[in-house]
Amino acid sequence: MDLKNKVALVTGGGTGIGKATCFALAARGATVAVNYSRSKVDAEETAQIINNEGGRALAIRADVSQDREVREMVDTIVGRFGTIDLLVNNASITRHISFDDLEAATEEVWDELYDVNVKGMFFCARAVAPFMKSNKQGAIVNLGSIAGQTGLGSSLPYAVSKAAVHGLTKSLARALAPNIRVNCVVPGAVATRWWSGREEQMMKLAPNLLLQRISTPEDIAQFICTALEQEAMTGQIITVDSGQTL
């Protein structure tokens, strides 16, 4: 799929991988809706940079864990740009909890992470699907994590939520075929604000990776665009981790 003149929604688009993806899509000529929940200043700055460089972008707030807010967001985007062709389900949250502290993985933590990381991705996919079906083409990329493959990560509930994202990708690929492709990009360690306060730990990890480098948000964003473009692929879980999981 040629991304030029397509309308893309990127959740969590104001920071990190989401921000880099918004820029990568705009560079390919796509119109970008930059979703945010709390990072208003970052999202508006991202959209403004794209608009200042001759692209088209809109910053728009919605908590993806709330179906009503998601549907209202999608209606606003369609009202402004006519349709939605592409969805990048990037918005995710975590809690840093020691794996052996099972009591700290409270019901509240489980609900919070699943509401955003899993249900939020489903709500967004469900909301955009009718417009993609009407166009007889569309593409969705969900952001997974190697935590969902290895069982390791910032917390046990986070790792399990990302494993659920991988499963959601396969189920949505079946549910939305043949006109809508759904794939999952699975980053390893990425140099984003998620490492805030733990930069030394991140730098110690780099030499132990096969490629001896931590992925950048731009690395992941470029591959997200590739997955959106690839018309012969759906239901795939694709790892981009500098060899971290080998």
Image (cartoon, rainbow, N blue to C red):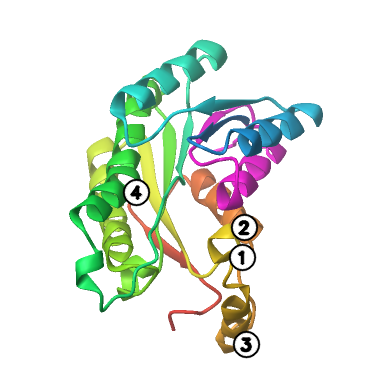
Of 36 and 106, the residue lying toward us? 106
Q: Is residue 105 magenta?
A: no
Do the residues under discs 1 and 2 have CB atoms within 8 angstroms? yes
The residue that label 4 is drawn on is 117
Camera-nearest residue between 96 and 85: 96
Frontmost of labels 1 and 2 is 1
Q: Which residue corresponds to mark 1?
A: 191
Residue 13 x, y percent position in the rendering: 56, 40
Mark 2 or mark 1, which is nearer the start of the sequence? 1
Q: Tell me what residue is drawn at x 39 percent, y 65 percent.
A: 96
Q: Residues within 10 Å of mark 3 (few under 14, many from 20)?
A: few
Relative horizontal placement of residue 45, taking residue 195 as reference (left or right): right
Decide: few, some or many residues near mark 2? Use Cα within 10 Å; few <14, some 14-19, many ≥20: some
Tell me the amino acid under the disc marked 2.
Pro
What residue did someone put label 3 on? 207
Please say if 200 is above or below 4.
below
Magenta-highlighted residues: 1-30
Q: Secondary structure at mark 1?
A: loop
Q: Provide the residue designation for mark 2.
A: 217
Residue at x 57% of width, y 80% of height: 201
State which tag comes first along the sequence, 4 or 2: 4
Query: Marks 4/3: CA distance?
Result: 30 Å
SS class, disc 2: helix
Q: Are marks 4 and 3 in contact (CB under 8 Å)?
A: no
